[in-house]
Image (cartoon, rainbow, N blue to C red):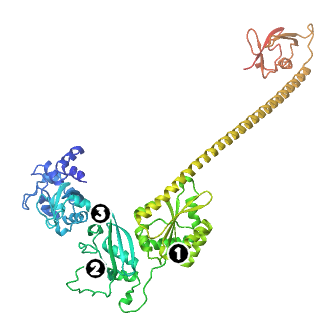
Amino acid sequence: MILADFQACTGIDNIAEAIALLELNNWDLVAAINGVIPQENGILPSNFSSEGTQTSGFGPHSQPTGATPPSSSASAFCPVPPLRHIIERQPRMLNFRVEYRQRCVEVVLEDASTVGEIKQILETELQIPMSKMQLKGWKTGDVSDSTVLRSLHLPKNNSLYVLTPDIAPAASTSQNSALQESLNQNFLLVVSHREAQRDYSLNFPGSRTVQEVKRNISDLTNIPVRHQQWEGWPATVTDDSMTLAASGISYPCHHLSVCRRASPAPPREQPEECTDVHMVSDSEGDDFEDASEFGVDEAEMFGMGTSGCRKSPMMPENAENEGDALMHFTAEFSARYGDCHPVFFIGSLEAASQEAFYGKARDRKLLAIYLHNDESVLANVFCSQMLCAESIVSYLSQNFITWAWDVTKEANKARLLTMCTRHFGSVVAQTIRTYKTDQFPLLLIVMGKRASNEVLNVIQGNTTVDELMMRLMGATEIFTAQQQEDIRDEDEREAREMVKREQDEAYRLSLEADRRKREAQEREEAEQVRLEQIRKEQEEEREAIRLSLEQALPPEPEEEGVEPVSKLRIRTPSGEFLERRFLGSCKLQVLFDFVASKGYPQEEFKLLTTFPRRNITQLDPAWTFLEAKLFPQETLFLEAKE
């Protein structure tokens, strides 16, 4: 659009020349036009005052408002409509390269945007509040956040830098890299529940916050976050939103203890001496969430005295079929633990077994059966920390068909045991019966074999991500070895079947060739018989015609008769001569019949005189010998027609 406007105003038809001039002025249309047209005929900002634009909207060649208006020749050279179109054109896209300490951010905005919009993007990218950010490098000096970029007459590419005098620089890049490395590490927290006299070993990534750890402990101990009293957090933990990597806990293992507070602390006012936030959690934003999740009823907190809300079951008891039950399970699992979870097979256990075990050897997978029990204290931690870990989800998706079932309800558990007995035998069902509720959830790893299916491993809920991954990988190694053997057997079997198919196909083609050859021979013989029959019939017909003609010939006259006699001597193609006498008054048809009676029909042969050469066959058969000048004697010869 800028190129078209420039050509319309300057009259330059050469596109390459126009682009070169615009490039020299950084595609500033007004500056490029004023650079081509002399100043007295150029485009002055005062031209556009009548159009409602400000004089400051045009670049370095702007003149005061009282400047002399352009001459009529300039108006004729650059009419008003194209200039109005120039003013109302679409915004240009501007590129900004913004540097901040060791970082560089690329920003692309329209020239109708403001400086504040650049800062908003930088706030997201650099994690620096706009109020503490100073954007420097403008050619016109410092600008406000509300300044429109178009009014600054900027080139297409610009370089800026950010100053943050209120933010102290990082100690070193090595510290930043160390913190980033800590965020990716896994911390083992050994949490001692003093009332229950039980220890929990939990693995957390360094990116988890203290608040998230306390919520997970709430799931295990049924102590709401606001009632938890802790010991063992470092003194650097001043905020529950702090990550474990930044908290200063010991790596790779850190010991903590938790118990329920004897009496709730005042809601807002606390004495000056109680400043240890690590001993007593004050997570105001989690009160209602904890109350609804762990049985502390919101209505009871407000004195209404109603019973607390409970989670909806993972799987209903009255599902019509296994597919519907699995769909409900998947939806409830996603609602509780998020969308990052294994892809559960929707269908019956038999269908999942068929999908995993009974395809081609290269396509077979292990079957992972996840058994959930809401009454187990390990269920939430196992699902959220282990089963939904990205590494576990990815590994299960690549190597397993994952099927799930909820055994919280006795009816569903009985239904599962029946299915396991039918598909895997009574031993597996009996094994599941031996596990207690607090040992759930379970993850059964099943491998398909030629004779029967085998349960390779049963993983209980009291495990860690690393241990879970190691056991999954161990099962995969066993399965891979068996799969390679199955692939070899399958390839050998397919090779044998291929050879057999090729032999059968070659035999079939041989039979087909013999059949076609036999049929062709039979057709040829039949054709020969038919042609022989036709030939015989034709010969018999010709013989009959010859005999009839021979019998119909008038008797040969005597040589010394009263009537004139013509004596003819006829040479045949074989070299023999036919001699006969005819009355001079006989018709030529008698001659033709005589020749035909000797086996030379008129349709196939012609009679010719020697000299002068005449074709007697072409004469009128009604002519007499005298009229045809075949008197008193003549020598003729027979010649086959072409």
Q: Which image quarter is the N terminus in? A: bottom left
Rendering quarter of residue 410: bottom right
Q: Which mark is residue 407?
A: 1
Q: Earlier in the sequence, mark 2 or mark 1?
A: 2
Residue lying farthest to the top in this orientation: 560
Tell me: 403 left or right of 541: left
Rendering quarter of residue 70: bottom left
Q: Earlier in the sequence, mark 3 or mark 2?
A: 3
* Residue 154 point in image, percent of width and height: 17, 57
Q: Nearer the viewer, mark 3 or mark 2?
A: 2
Tell me: 535 left or right of 377: right
Closer-to-camera residue (519/409)? 409
Report the residue marked by disc 3: 182
Q: Nearer the viewer, mark 3 or mark 1?
A: 3
Query: Circle 1 sits in a helix, a strand or a loop, which is it?
Result: loop
Report the amino acid beneath label 3.
Answer: Ser
